């Protein structure tokens, strides 16, 4: 069994093929963490919980003074606030007496096959019960009546597990949850580097590494989204670790709103790691009998460095997060009109793009922002999701049908969570936007944010979107979100529940997305938030691909895509060839091919030579689709290691095919240059389309391929393909 309980030692052991996670029921029913790391077959963890105690400053349970136990020093499986544990806390409940002292102890547990869903929240799933095993550990705070269930699910074929928390009020008085983190992990050392993904609009998910230090470190968002600024991902890598070697621990939160990812190194040089809802501006009143579910966190361990960690995340998300018709179905190659036309379009201009797309081999036209209300710029009409009749001579339905008659699929852009002050719906319902009394309503991009906590708002959006989606032959929607949330509050929430706003907001968004995807299961759903502002596993649960960034310049995009790949698979990464000027179409193609390939341009600006080149790119897209979307990714040269060039490789699951891509960002002095491939089968022979030679996998991985004749010039790139010779 991947999860076992040794009743004599009171030890829980959670195993995958390459990792072990262990904790125990200690004296007085404390839950104590023992180990998380490379797989160990036995469970002789006696004494692994012990930590040094320092005089009286680390207080102890009076019944355990003789043992040396202190909640301030021992590795707690769930660190609680106010009862001896002085480190950052994973759980803080303010009870009816007004204090926030929290102390939960083990009561019972159960182990079963499969994985439970989390009500109202996205979460990973089991394709069948034999794929996962789940452990639920029930704990109780006897004073407040808070029953806290820790849920662990092990994915038996991958070195991955999920963690979440359920808080139930079993008392007769209401209490307030002030902090509930989705997992708490106490590690025995501080010999790690902390890796996070920072950024901004047009420059998301850049790699940052720094050594752990005593005290607090971490990242978070208070923007109402998972954010472009700090992605809800972090990793710990052993100091001697690298892309291919060393202990790597990856943590990712399946959540699209305010988050907090924290670490603390204590005076024993031990590290606590936590991840969950950001407690700033958060609180949740829980009445007797009610339950609160935390978002789910994903934990991945690899002893093969960051590369092994990443590939586990990729396989896990492709198999157990992405859902629906388009999980494995080949997705249509699209052209989006946004960078070509902006909002300055009519049906004739769009039809010309559609006609070119059909002639070139593109399979879908996506009509972006500007088709609704009286939307000629970004100052109006959000919320008025009915067609702008001035832009469609025969109506939008007639135009869509004309595109379908060409043999193309058709997609459409929405920004459902936004409302323009200059819109019909705002004039009717000014209270539908997020606002607080007596304060000005901040604008961003000349728009407000809809109050998604309200059922009437969600019903309006579902009905008006369904009117378009249900009465037209639409195959795809792009769902955008283009500003942060300010003046956070709802007109319908009482004062004592205003701190619930942000979590209720994202639950409302999830509920609407769930309704839309269930009502229109055929739709290919692509998420977007000014590009990558909600590039998180919560959104990937609803949309099998997400627009990676509004920055489509290939030389900038490659840094964003490398950072994204630490956790997120190529299959969800929206990447397009655009009309950016800094590189040629070959480099644009090579970078955009690392994802759900497409185009953003106006064919009127494309030369005949470029058109012929694009037709060749499209043939390659079809040829290498499975290799890129479902193959294993190896980062060969990362931009955080080399500012001048980078390289990456995809290898098919059966190791019969590989594609190596090299990009020279900035030319340097010419020198000998050898690249060693990764992930091949050492015993197989491969033919290389770069030089026509046949080499063994062992030769390619150990001796490499000599590329000293590759041109050294800014923006040059090259894709080299290898295929097994049988």
Image (tube, grey):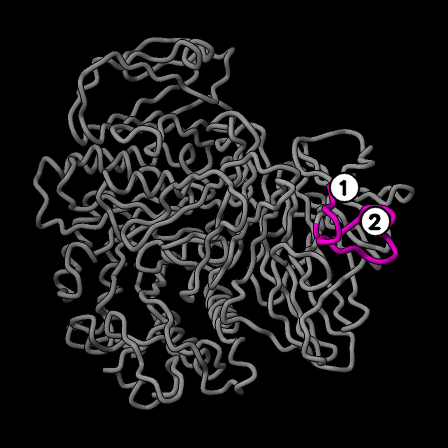
Q: In this view, does 6 lie above or below 70?
A: above
Q: Name the residue under label 2.
A: 26
Asked if residue 374 is positioned above or below residue 366 in the image, the reply reads below
The residue sitting at 70% across, 52% down in the picture is: 72
Q: Is residue 126 at least partly visible in the picture?
A: no
* Residue pictured at 74% horizontal, 70% vertical: 146
Compared with residue 38, is residue 194 higher up or lower down, i.e. above or below? Answer: below
Is residue 70 found inside the magenta-colored segment of the image? yes
Q: Name the residue carrying label 1.
A: 49
Query: What residue sits 37% from the left and 9% below the top?
Result: 694
Q: Is mark 2 on a helix, strand or loop?
A: loop
Q: As rendered, which of 152 and 272 lies closer to the eye?
A: 272
**Relative horizontal placement of residue 94, taking residue 308 as reference (left or right):** right
User: For the residue carrying disc 2, how many other residues have a C-alpha within 10 Å: few (<14), some (14-19), or many (20+)?
Assistant: some
| C-alpha span from label 2 to label 1 | 9 Å
The part of the chain drawn in magenta is 50-72
Residue placed most toward the observer, 610 or 210: 210
């Amino acid at each position: 069994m991947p999860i076992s309980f040794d009743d004599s030692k009171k030890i829980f052991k959670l195993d995958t093929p390459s990792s072990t996670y262990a904790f125990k029921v200690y004296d007085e029913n404390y839950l104590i963490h023992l180990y998380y790391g490379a797989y160990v077959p036995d469970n002789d963890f006696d004494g692994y919980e012990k930590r040094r105690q320092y005089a009286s400053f680390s207080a102890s349970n009076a019944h355990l003074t003789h043992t040396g136990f202190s909640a301030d020093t021992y590795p707690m499986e769930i660190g609680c606030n106010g009862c001896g544990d002085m480190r950052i806390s994973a759980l803080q409940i303010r009870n009816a007496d007004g204090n926030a002292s929290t102390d939960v102890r083990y009561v019972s547990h159960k182990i079963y096959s499969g994985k439970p869903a989390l009500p109202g929240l996205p979460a990973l799933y089991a394709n069948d019960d034999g794929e996962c095993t789940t452990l639920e550990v029930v704990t109780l705070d006897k004073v407040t009546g808070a029953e806290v269930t820790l849920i662990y699910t092990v994915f038996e074929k991958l070195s991955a597990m999920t963690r979440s928390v359920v808080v139930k009020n079993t008392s007769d008085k209401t209490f307030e949850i002030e902090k509930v983190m989705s997992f708490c992990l106490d590690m025995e050392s501080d010999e790690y580097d902390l890796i996070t993904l920072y950024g901004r609009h047009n420059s998301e998910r850049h790699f940052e590494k720094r050594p752990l230090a005593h005290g607090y470190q971490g990242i978070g968002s208070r923007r109402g989204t998972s954010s472009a600024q700090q992605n809800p991902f972090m990793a710990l890598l052993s100091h001697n670790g690298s892309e291919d070697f060393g202990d790597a621990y990856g943590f990712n939160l399946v959540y699209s709103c305010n988050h907090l990812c924290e670490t603390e190194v204590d005076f024993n040089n031990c590290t606590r790691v936590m991840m969950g809802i950001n407690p700033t501006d958060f609180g949740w009143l829980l009445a007797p009998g009610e339950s609160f579910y935390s978002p789910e966190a994903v934990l991945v361990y690899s002893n093969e460095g960051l590369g092994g960690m990443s590939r586990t995340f990729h396989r896990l998300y492709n198999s157990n997060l992405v859902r629906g018709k388009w999980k494995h179905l080949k997705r249509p190659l699209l052209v989006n009109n946004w960078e070509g036309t902006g909002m300055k379009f009519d049906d004739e201009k769009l039809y010309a793009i559609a006609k070119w797309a059909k002639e070139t081999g593109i399979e879908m036209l996506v009509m972006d922002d500007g088709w609704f209300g009286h939307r000629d710029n970004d100052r109006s009409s959000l919320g008025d999701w009915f067609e702008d009749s001035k832009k469609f001579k025969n109506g939008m339905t007639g135009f869509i049908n004309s595109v379908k008659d060409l043999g193309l699929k058709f997609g459409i852009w929405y920004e459902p969570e936004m409302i323009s002050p200059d819109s019909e719906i705002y004039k009717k319902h000014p209270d539908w936007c997020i606002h607080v009394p007596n304060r000005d309503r901040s604008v961003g991009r000349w728009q407000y944010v809809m109050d998604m906590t309200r059922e009437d708002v969600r019903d309006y959006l579902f009905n008006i979107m369904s009117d378009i989606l249900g009465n037209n032959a639409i195959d795809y929607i792009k769902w955008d979100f283009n500003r942060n949330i300010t003046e956070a509050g709802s007109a319908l929430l009482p004062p004592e529940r205003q701190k619930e706003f942000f979590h209720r907001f994202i639950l409302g968004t999830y509920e609407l997305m769930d309704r839309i995807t269930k009502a229109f299961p055929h739709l290919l759903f692509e998420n977007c938030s000014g590009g990558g502002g909600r590039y998180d596993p919560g959104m990937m649960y609803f949309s099998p691909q997400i627009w990676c960034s509004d920055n489509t310049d290939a030389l900038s995009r490659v840094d964003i895509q490398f950072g994204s790949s630490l956790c997120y698979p190529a299959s969800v990464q929206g990447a397009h060839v655009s009309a950016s000027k800094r590189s040629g179409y070959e480099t644009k193609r090579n970078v955009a091919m690392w994802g759900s390939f497409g185009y953003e341009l106006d064919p009127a600006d494309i030369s005949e030579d470029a058109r012929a080149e694009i037709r060749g790119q499209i043939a390659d897209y079809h040829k290498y689709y499975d290799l890129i979307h479902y193959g294993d990714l190896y980062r060969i040269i990362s931009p955080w290691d080399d500012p001048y060039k980078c390289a990456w490789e995809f290898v098919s699951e059966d190791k019969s095919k590989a594609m190596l891509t090299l990009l020279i960002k900035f030319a340097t002095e010419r020198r000998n240059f050898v690249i060693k491939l990764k992930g091949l089968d050492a015993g197989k022979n491969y033919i290389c389309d770069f030089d026509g030679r046949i080499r063994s996998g062992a030769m390619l991985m150990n001796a490499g391929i000599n590329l000293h004749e590759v041109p050294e010039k800014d923006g040059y790139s090259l894709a080299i393909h290898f295929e097994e010779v049988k």
